[in-house]
Amino acid sequence: MSYPQKLSTETILVSAMSYIGTHGLDTLTMRTLATTLGVTPNALYRYFPSKAALEYAMADQAGLAMLTVLKQAAANKNPSQAMVAIAKVYVQFACDNHALYALKMRHGADPLGRPNSHDAVWAFVMDVVARLQTRWDTKNLAMSLWAFLHGLVELNHANLLEGRPPEAAMTVGLEVLLAGLTSPQ
């Protein structure tokens, strides 16, 4: 049996990521994805042995996409400006791509099987935070920033921001965070 020339790992990932962006992860099956691609479900298994393997690959791709926008946002900025810039694009990326973001976060929680991109994103954020040179532990400071941003994303997704854009609360939170970082002990 020959495999369609148009089918590749990248084609499958792009189609699957587009599908969950529109329909959500819960409705994605190998059969629906195959129909979308115009192939039989068995053709997909040549590239991904299971839906779980496909989800893992999508989580890794989401992490790589997030890392790209974070690096672009931080480029050529001083540490404080870089932190603000990555905070803004983090929230924007997560809100605009919530299904992928949620998938990335779900796979990022498994230390035995998290995608490489999860650790790459974390290392990049740790580097930016370390450049701030504060009295606080870098990891605790990065975790605090992450908790704040993740909280905004999830509150926005649950429609609990009372119609306000997440950027409004983020601006206040970042100003408070930066004021605290620069205040004397």
Image (spheres, helix red, strand yellow):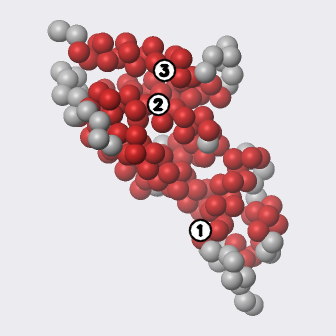
| Disc 1 to disc 3: CB gap under 8 Å | no
Residue at left 29%, top 27%? 80
Q: Is residue 161 left or right of residue 91?
A: right
| Disc 3 to disc 2: CB gap under 8 Å | yes
SS type, badge 2:
helix
* Residue at mark 3: 170
Characterize the local packing of mark 3: few (<14), some (14-19) or many (20 or more) Cα atoms within 10 angstroms.
Answer: some
- Residue 138 visible (yes or no): no
The quadrant in which residue 173 appears is top left
| Disc 1 to disc 2: CB gap under 8 Å | no
* Residue at mark 2: 88
Kindly identify the amino acid type of the residue bearing the numbered disc 3.
Met
Characterize the local packing of mark 2: few (<14), some (14-19) or many (20 or more) Cα atoms within 10 angstroms.
Answer: some
Residue at left 60%, top 71%? 9
| Real-space CA distance between mark 1 and mark 3, rounded to the nearest whole angstrom | 34 Å
Q: Which quarter of the rendered picture does the C terminus lie within?
A: top left
Question: Which of disc 3 and disc 1 is earlier in sequence?
Answer: 1
Q: From the viewer's perspective, is residue 135 above or below residue 45?
A: above
Kindly identify the amino acid type of the residue bearing the numbered disc 1.
Glu
Residue at left 52%, top 32%? 91
Kindly identify the amino acid type of the residue bearing the numbered disc 2.
Lys
* Residue at mark 1: 10
The quadrant in which residue 41 appears is bottom right
The quadrant in which residue 93 appears is top right
Question: Which of disc 2 and disc 3 is earlier in sequence?
Answer: 2
Question: Which of disc 2 and disc 1 is earlier in sequence?
Answer: 1
Horizontal and vertical percent for residue 10? 59, 68
